[in-house]
Image: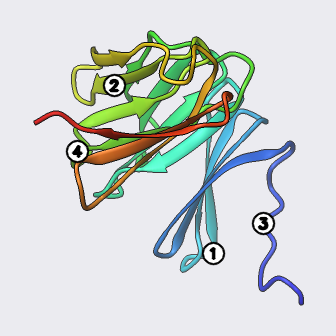
Amino acid sequence: MKPVQVLEEAKDSVSSLHVVGHEIVTGSVDERMRIYDLRMGMVFVDVIGHPITSTTQTRDANAVLVSTLDSTIRLMDKGNGRLLQSYNGHTNKDYRIRSMLGMADSVVISGSEDGKLYAWDLLEGKVVSTIDEAHGGKVASAVAVNGVKREWASAGADGTVCVWSMPD
């Protein structure tokens, strides 16, 4: 088999891939977020300035959540590349940590190298909840949100997957 199309713009590893409709959003260790518009045959590039570990598009497709190896998660405007909000408090300097949006895009959820799970208010950028030692104090590397139920899961370096219920 051969690929239908090959996108070769990244100069280093592509660490994140998010597909919605006719768009592909990628994050790369080369510090760039790329948005490929397959209908228009165009690529839009934003230089974030730090290696990217995770990208997730908002439900309205107007912004992208970008996690980087400087312990910062950024909400970037897709239209103009401006920073809308940033989220700090977790540790992400060495490993690929995945972050997600939850509760109808009102909360940012992420793991951390310090073994905790964090949740921030999307608009205010303030930590609203933490779960200590979610994975035995080891790196909490990934989160995934259930779009139907008020549940989400985390995975960690301890080899476990934990399912959590979001508070009302």
- Label number found at residue 7: 3
Residue 71 vs residue 88: left or right? right
Q: For mark 2, give the secondary structure.
A: strand
Label 2 vs 1, first from the N-terminus: 1
Marks 1 and 4 sit apart, C-alpha to C-alpha, by: 33 Å
Colouring scheme applied when the structure was drawn: rainbow
- The answer to whether mark 1 and mark 4 are in CB contact below 8 A is no
Tell me which numbered mark, 2 or 3, is placed earlier along the sequence.
3
User: Image height check: is 40 above or below 96?
Assistant: below
Residue placed under numbered mark 1 in the picture: 41
From the viewer's perspective, is the residue at label 1 or at label 3 nearer? Answer: 3
In the rendered image, residue 98, in percent from the top left (x then y), is placed at 56, 37
The residue that disc 2 covers is: 119
Q: Which residue is mark 4?
A: 103
Residue 164 in picture, x, y percent from top left: 34, 38
3D distance between C-alphas at marks 4 and 2:
11 Å
How far is mark 2 from mark 1, CA to CA? 36 Å
Mark 3 and mark 4 residues within 8 Å of each other at the beta carbon: no
Residue 120: name its quadrant.
Answer: top left
Q: What residue appears at the point 22 percent right and 20 percent down from the top-left corner?
A: 124
Q: Residue at position x 25%, y 62% from top?
A: 148
Left or right, residue 39 beside residue 62: right
Q: Residue furthest bottom?
A: 1
Q: Marks 1 and 2: in contact by CB < 8 Å?
A: no
CB atoms of marks 2 and 3 within 8 Å: no
